[in-house]
Amino acid sequence: MAFLEWLQSTWVGVLVAESLWGYPLLETIHSLGIAMLIGSLGLINLRVLGYKPDLPLLGMQQLLPLAWVGFTLNAISGTLLFTSDAVFFFESYTFRIKMVLIVLGGINAAMLGQRVFREAAGMPATPPAASTKWIAVTSLVFWFGAVCAGRLIAYTP
Amino acid sequence: MEFLVWLENTPIANAIRTIPWLYPAFETGHYIGLSLLVGGILLIDLRVLGMARGLPLKSMIGLLPFVWAGFIINVLTGSMLFIYGATNFGPNGAFQLKMAFMVVAGLNALAFDVAVRRSGGVWVTADRPPALVKGFATLSLVFWLCVVTTGRWMAYL
């Protein structure tokens, strides 16, 4: 707790919290990161579930750089946003749920990538197994859940 | 202005004022719509500009229904959000800019659509978008970025 209080008192935390442009700029970047992440991972997950079979399954890997850019933008902007009100965010149950969902989403993405891209590479094209499709479903739930949780932080304990 | 006052006193606006979870629900819905709209348009525009070449251009342009779904969700949720605070948002400079950018983005999308139809799909199949079309794609990214940014600024003006 003392660490969090110290964090929000640093020049970064104060700058983000009190400058006219700091918070809205970071929030905007955070929204764009969401669009990149949801766009790329969303499409990959949908493709695994069978949507748009004309998209080559292995080729979907080419969307991963966009996902990484989005994730990185959000990790950085998210951390900076956090510093502006560290105690509040840390104590927010909705924020904690969001963090859990992001971790779960990340684990899911790694599992999906392992099965769909690494195991499938070099093998004849086969539709993903049922268990892989379930990972895609939960992945969508986790990422959309994280978006919802993020927006609800301001409204919930 | 009288119209804005009238809007703020409609049954819908009163419902949003009295039922506490409605506004957060509409805001969250607006973010989901943003993820679909901007996420989708990011994928299409970046693909036109050459990202993820392994994915067929035609298939990526075929993602437009998602963009439309996001757009419709945001027109609906946005209308609800607007009605609730019409006298605040109507005169808000950031809101007016946001609407202006949306009109321009829409016109740009129309131009892109005309270009696709006029060509009879030739450059789509050949994956060689003309420079003009790449220009439309670039402008599209800029315009939607401006929509998101001005949207966020509404709360700060």
Image (tube, rainbow, N blue to C red):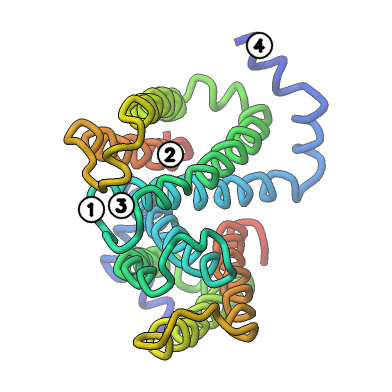
Using residue B99 as the reference point, say whether residue B51 is left or right of it. Answer: left
User: Chain under label 1?
Assistant: B
- Dot 1 amino acid type: Gly
Given this view, does label 2 or label 1 mark the residue nearer the observer? 1
Q: Can residue A13 be seen in this view?
A: no
Give the mark nearer the N terminus: 1 vs 4. 4
Residue B85 sits in quarter: top right
> Element at badge 3?
helix
Q: Can residue A48 be seen in this view?
A: yes
How far apart are the alpha carbons under marks 3 and 2?
A: 34 Å
Q: Which residue is drawn at 65% across and 9% down?
A: B2
Is there a contact, CB below 8 Å, between mark 2 and mark 4?
Answer: no
Residue A117 sits in quarter: bottom left
Q: Return the residue nearer the eye: A7 or B72.
A: B72
| Label 3 sits on residue | B47
Q: Do labels 2 and 4 share a chain?
A: yes
Given this view, does label 2 or label 4 mark the residue nearer the observer? 4
Given this view, does label 1 or label 4 mark the residue nearer the observer? 1
Residue B118 sits in quarter: top left
How far apart are the alpha carbons under marks 3 and 1?
A: 5 Å
Checking the image for residue B3, the label placed there is: 4
User: Chain under label 3?
Assistant: B
Total tally of numbered discs in the picture: 4
Q: Which residue is drawn at 78% across and 30% down?
A: B12
| Label 2 sits on residue | B156
